[in-house]
Image: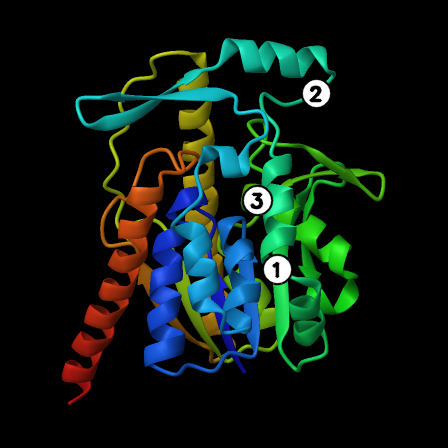
Amino acid sequence: MKALVISGGGSKGAFAGGVAQYLIQDLKRKYQLFIGTSTGSLLVSHLALNKIEKIKSVYTSVNNDSIFNVCPFIVKKRHGTQNIAINHLNVIRNFLRGSKTFGESFSLRHLIENTLLEEEFLKLKTSPLDIVVTVSNLSLNHVEYKSIKDFSYHEFCDWIWVSCNYTPFMTLVKKDGCEYADGGMGNMVPIEEAINRGAKEVDVIILQTEVTQLNRMPSKNPFSLITNMFGFMLDRIESQNIKIGKFVASHNDVIINFYYAPTILTTNSLIFDEQQMTEWWQDGYNFAKFKNKGLSQLEN
């Protein structure tokens, strides 16, 4: 069984989409299992359907309004770079409404349902393919993997949304009596889960560089401090997930093909910029093409 695993990474998911496009359309890779975390969970259903141009059009046209109905920050451009500052008015209004988070992402929930149609969901559910998304159960303190085979259309759309909800900046979702958040808080790169489900070859798209190259700028306000702290924690989680995945693969004779981002795409993946994401998609496609041509030359 071949599996495609896509890590979390917010807006950087556009790069993963470009890599996946090359693997599926050009290399004709046939996957039986698709597993995604966070932004990866938004991609996997459409990749399984081979509706690549459709999901590409979404990733290259969204902005923060497409994701947040209450955006907790303001994007400021200084010296050619994008920085965020807290949107005090939106945050205060949100807390007065009784929210537990700085912002709300119900716009993303609507986008998911408007993009993945019910007939497409039913086609996938009745197919031999399996599509799995990763979520973090904060109440029970463990990671859960939600397969398309086990849920109705609206339930599965909810789980995709849950997998992407980067709390405390996005909505904290309560389902089945438990509080759920972004799958990346528990497993950024679910290689082990793909192997546990029977995969013998796994293509893994990771939206970080293979070697740490990041030197974060000093925090300018409490909001940027929180984003830096969460970024640090998720980087550590991702590193551990990859190590565990490699260990499990070595003990089960599983082949893993890694596709790391070759450069740092952004230091804040909560910023959704149409032009930037369009460039990242093409960069991902070009990178996968270059990497596979290099491998072919080495084999010859």
| Secondary structure of the residue carrying numbered label 3 | helix
Q: Which residue is mark 3?
A: 164
Comes first in the chain, label 1 or label 2: 2
Does 163 sit above or below residue 26?
above
| Secondary structure of the residue carrying numbered label 2 | loop
Quarter in which the N terminus is drawn: bottom right
Give the residue type that dot 1 points to. Leu
Give the residue type that dot 3 points to. Cys
Q: How many neighbours does mark 2 have within 10 angstroms: few (below 14), some (14-19), or many (20 or more)?
A: some
Q: Is residue 103 visible?
A: yes
Does 71 sit above or below residue 253?
above
> x, y percentage for residue 289?
24, 71
Q: Is residue 243 visible?
A: no
Q: Of discs 1 and 3, which sits in the foreground? A: 1
Q: Is residue 209 left or right of residue 89?
A: left
Which residue is most to the bottom? 300
Q: Nearer the viewer, residue 35 or 89?
A: 89
Disc count in the image?
3
| Secondary structure of the residue carrying numbered label 1 | loop
